[in-house]
Amino acid sequence: MTLEVSHVVGGYSQIPVLKDISFDVKDGELVGLIGLNGAGKSTTINHIIGLLTPFSGTISINGITIAENDQLYKQQIAYIPETPVLYPELTLREHIELTIMAYRLNQEEAWQKANELLKTFRLDNKLDWFPSNFSKGMRQKVMIVCAFITNANLFIIDEPFMGLDPLAKSDLLAEMDKKKRAGASILMTTHVLETAQQYCDRFVLLHDGQVRVEGTLKELHEAFPDSGESLNDIYLSLTKKAGQTE
Amino acid sequence: MKTLFSTRLSRHLRNMVKYLRLVFNDFFIFALMFLIGGLGYGYSIELQRLHANSWWAPLIVIVVAMISVQIGRLATLIESADSVFLLPREHDMHAYLVAGRRYSLWLAMVTQGLVWFVLLPFIRVTLTTNWMNIVGLLIIMVSQKDLILRRALANCYRYETPLIKRGWMIDWGWSLILFATAAYGGWVIAAGLAIAADLVFAVQTATTWAKHPIDWRAEIVREDSRMLSIYRFFNLFTDVPMLRGTIHRRSYLDGLFRRIPANQANTFRYLYARGLVRGTEFSGLIIRLTLIGLVILYFVRGLWLPVIFSALFVYLLGFQLLPYFSQFDDNVFTHIYPVANTEKLKNFQQVMRTILIVTGVLFVVMACIANLNWETPVVLTLVLGVEIWVMVQFYAPRRLARQKN
C-alpha cells in the first residue's frame, strides 16, 4: 500500500476544508481524484505533499508519516503542480541538476532518463534557456521531466493535461504507464473525465470536502445503477444529488 | 481619457509621497542639509579659483546642459493590463498620452530650472556674457526638453521614421548642435532654432499620430523600467514591495559556481548562488554597498575611522542579505525537496560568508591603497574577520529563527 490517507480533517485556517476523508493508492495503481472547483482536491494534495498539516488523521507513504521521518517521506514523492512552478534564475539544465541534487539521484542514470524525456517532449534543444519564459505547455513539460527523472514511489499530478498539446498528452500518459508498471503509484486530479475514465484504475470522487464514493468504474456503476454509463454521467448526477440533499 | 490619466496621476503621486516621506526622514534631511551646504561651499571655493574666458568653460556648460535635458523621461503611467483593456479605445489614448506628456514637461521644467540655477554662478564667473544670454540658455533648455518629450510621445506610436525611433538623433545630436550654437554662435540663433524645431515637430506629428497604431508592448516595457528605476531609488532607503528585479543569464559568471559540489547537501547553495548572481535585486544591493564603502574608504584615512566604516558596511551588507534566505520560499518545490531545513540554513550561511569575505577583502585592499601602511590593513583584517565570523555563525541563524516565529 503506497499512499494511505485516513480520517484526515484539514484546511488552511481554523475552518476545515476536508471533513474526515480516507482513501488509498496501492502500488502500481493510477487513482483519479475527481471533484468540482473548490471540492478540496488541491487541499488534499497540499496535505499529502506536506505543505499543510492535518488537524487530525494521518497520511502515510509506505507506512511512513511525515512526522516520523520527513526526509524519507518526501523522498518518495514526485509532484507536478497544476500551474508550473519554476525558478526564474535557473536554466532548464539547472532545473534538472537541482532535482538530481535534491533527490540524491545517480547523475548518469538521471541524465540518461532526462535526455530521453527531453527528447520525447521536444525540449532537448532548450537546455540552456530560462524555462520561466516558456509557454504554459512547455513549462508544464519541464515539470513533467523533473518529476519523472526521480525514483519516487508516489507521483502526484495535479491537472496534468491542461495546456498540453495532444502529442504531449499521449506521451505523458505513456510515461505514467511506464512508472505504473515499475510499481509506482499515481494520484492524479483532473477535469478531463473521458481521459480519466480511460486510464485510471480507480476513482475517488470528492465533493464538498468529503469522499462521496471511491472505487473502480464498475464499482461506481454498481453503487449508483441509475446514474448513467460514463464517469461523466455518474459524476454529474452525484454532484447534482448532493446539491439537492443539502 | 484625460480623467483616467488624472486619477492615475493622483494615485501615483499619493504613492510617491508615501515613499518620499520615508526617504526624507529627519536623519536624511539632516544629512542632506550638510551635503548641500558642503557642496555649495566647495562650489563657491572652486569658483574663486577660476577666471574668465577659459577655453573649456563653454564646453562644460554644453555638456551639463546636454545631460540636463535628458533628465526626466516621459511618464505615461501605462500598465501592462492596458494593452487588453484600453485596446478598444486606442484612438482616444492620444488625449491620455498628451496629458502624460504635459505632466512630464512640468516635472522636467523644474529640473531644468534647478540645473540652470546651479550653472548661473559658473557662467557669470567664467564667461563674459550678459543676462540675456543666460536667460536665453534657459529658453533653449526648456524648448529642447519640450521637443525631446514630443519625440518620446511620438515614439509611443509605431512610427517608422528613424528620427522618432532612434532617440539619440534628437535627444543628443540636436541638443549638441543647439548648445554649441548657443555657446559659439549666439543664443538668439540657437533659441530660434530650438523653438522652430519644436514647432515643426509639433505640427508634423499633430495629425500623423492617428495613422499609426500605439506600440503597446514597447511602451509598457518603457514605463515599467521607468517605474522600476524610481522604486530602485526608494529601495535604497526602504523596502519597496513592487521591486522584483530582473534576471540576466550572465553566462560569463558560470565559472563561479564550479566550486559548488553537486550533491544533496549543497542543493540550496546551488540555488542561492545562482539566484544571487543572476538576479539584479540582491546583486545590485551588494555591488552598491561595496562600491560606496570603497569610495568612502578611499577618502577616510587613519586607523580607526576606516575600521569603523568597514565594519559598519559589512554589517549593513550582512543585514540586508538576510531576507534572501526566504527568497525561494514561494516556490513549492523548496518545501517538498527531501532536504533538511538545517541544510538550507547551512547553505545560506556559506553563501553569505563568501560574499562578506569578498567584500571584506576588497575593503582591506582599498585600505592598503588609501593608507600605505601595514597597521590599518592588519587591524582591519582582524576586525572584519571576527565580525564576519560572528555575523554568519551566530547573528544570522538567530535572526532568521526569530523571523520565522
Image: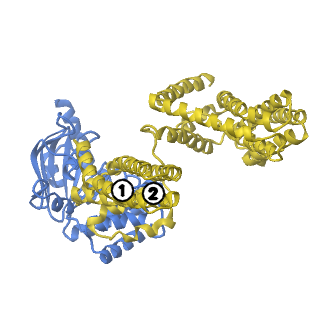
Chain colours: A blue, B yellow
Query: What chain letter is assigned to the residue under label 2?
Result: B
Instruction: List the residue tagged with mark 1.
Output: B384
Report whether B220 appears left or right of B28.
right
Q: Given the image, on which type of amino acid does mark 1 rest?
A: Leu
Q: Earlier in the sequence, mark 2 or mark 1?
A: 2
Residue A148 seen from this side: no
Side of B27 where B327 appears, left or right: left
CA gap, disc 2 and disc 1: 9 Å
Please name the residue shown 35% across and 65% down the image.
A145
Residue A224 place in picture, x, y as percent: 15, 45
Q: Disc 2 marks which amino acid?
A: Phe
Q: Quadrant of the C terminus of chain B?
A: top left
Q: Quadrant of residue B53?
A: top right
Between residues A111 and B53, which one lies in front from this camera angle? B53
Q: Which residue sits furthest top?
A: B3
Please say if the residues under marks 2 and 1 sit with CB atoms less than 8 Å apart: yes
Q: Nearer the viewer, residue B196 or A91?
A: B196
Residue for badge 2: B363
Picture residue at 29% right of the left edge, 60% below the top: B347
Q: Considering depth in this image, is B101 or B398 the residue closer to the camera?
A: B398
Q: Measured from the top left, where is residue B317 in percent x and y?
A: 40, 49
| Residue in the image at 82% along x and 41% along y | B179
Have a look at marks 2 and 1 and say if they share a chain. yes
Q: Note whether residue A146 is visible.
A: yes
How packed is label 1: few (under 14 Cα within 10 Å), some, or many (20 or more)? many
Task: Please identify the quadrant where the N terminus of chain B is shown.
Answer: top right
Describe the element under mark 1 as helix, strand or loop.
Answer: helix
Relative to residue B33, is residue B61 depicted above or below? below
